[in-house]
Amino acid sequence: MPRHLILIPTEPERRFLAPRLMSRLAALPPADTAVELCGFGIAAAAARTAQLIAALRPERVILVGIAGRLDERLALGTATLFERIACHGIGVGSGSAFISAAALGWQQWPGDPGDGNPGDGDPGVGDELPCAVPDGGDLPRERLLLTVTAAAAGPEDVRLRKGMFPEASAEEMEGFAVALACRLFRIPCTIIRGISNTAGDRDKAHWQLEAPLAAAANLVLRLLGGER
């Protein structure tokens, strides 16, 4: 069983990240780290993450890939950890009429009371979950990452999302799904994203890929190196 399960959403990201990660992690004990695809989007990422956790039983999960910035304070080509992950798109309506599941009083997971002993139950999950981040240190981190069911198509989408989640500094499409699967298995989930583009800008000529993925890989290696 690997201690660390590193999940990557898409094959282009995996082709870049996997060789860089595994060549540098070769010094760790054999089978200490597994690198796998989790799939693109909320549905695939949730199902594949649960499948891999059930099969491999890792001690922790690290999700790594690219994201679009919602806050221009984040520089393109950099990477960061996130303290919390929120979900946008599960609820009622669309655009300015959208109401999230939590705002409607619906939980995405109702929780599990367990056997009644303290700490045995699994509380319900609304639209946000905490991520596992190291205490202290100098690893870059942001307060909130937003998982969306569809990427922002333009500035108006960004404005609406920032209105609902003012602390969100970037958006992507898998983090909440991976974090929820980890929550159900009661293992920690760390999310690292490289900032590839400005959310809402669909012109890929403006995007960066290699620089943010290289920064994300380096951040994963710094995180794991700190545990040795």
Image (spheres, rainbow, N blue to C red):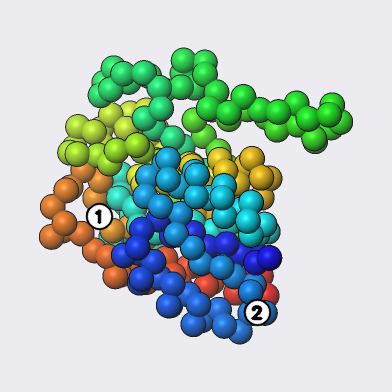
Instruction: Choose mark 2 or mark 1, whichever is in front.
Output: 2
Q: Position of residue 90 (x, y in %)?
A: 41, 27
Q: Which quarter of the figure has residue 183?
A: top right
Q: In the figure, 159 relative to 130: above or below? A: above
Q: Position of residue 58 (x, y in %)?
A: 65, 59
Q: Residues within 10 Å of mark 2 (few under 14, many from 20)?
A: few
- Give the quadrant of the N terminus: bottom right
Q: Is residue 215 visible?
A: no
CA separation, marks 2 and 1? 36 Å
Q: Position of residue 106 (x, y in %)?
A: 52, 18
Read off the residue under disc 1.
Answer: 197
What amino acid is found at the position of numbered circle 1 in the picture?
Answer: Asn
- Is residue 3 left or right of 164 when viewed as pictured? right
Give the residue displayed 56% in from the left and 50% down from the top. 51
- Residue 30's tag is 2
Give the residue displayed 36% in from the left and 30% down from the top. 89
Q: Residues within 10 Å of mark 1 (few under 14, many from 20)?
A: many
Q: Closer to the N terminus: mark 2 or mark 1?
A: 2
Nearer the observer, 107 or 12 = 12
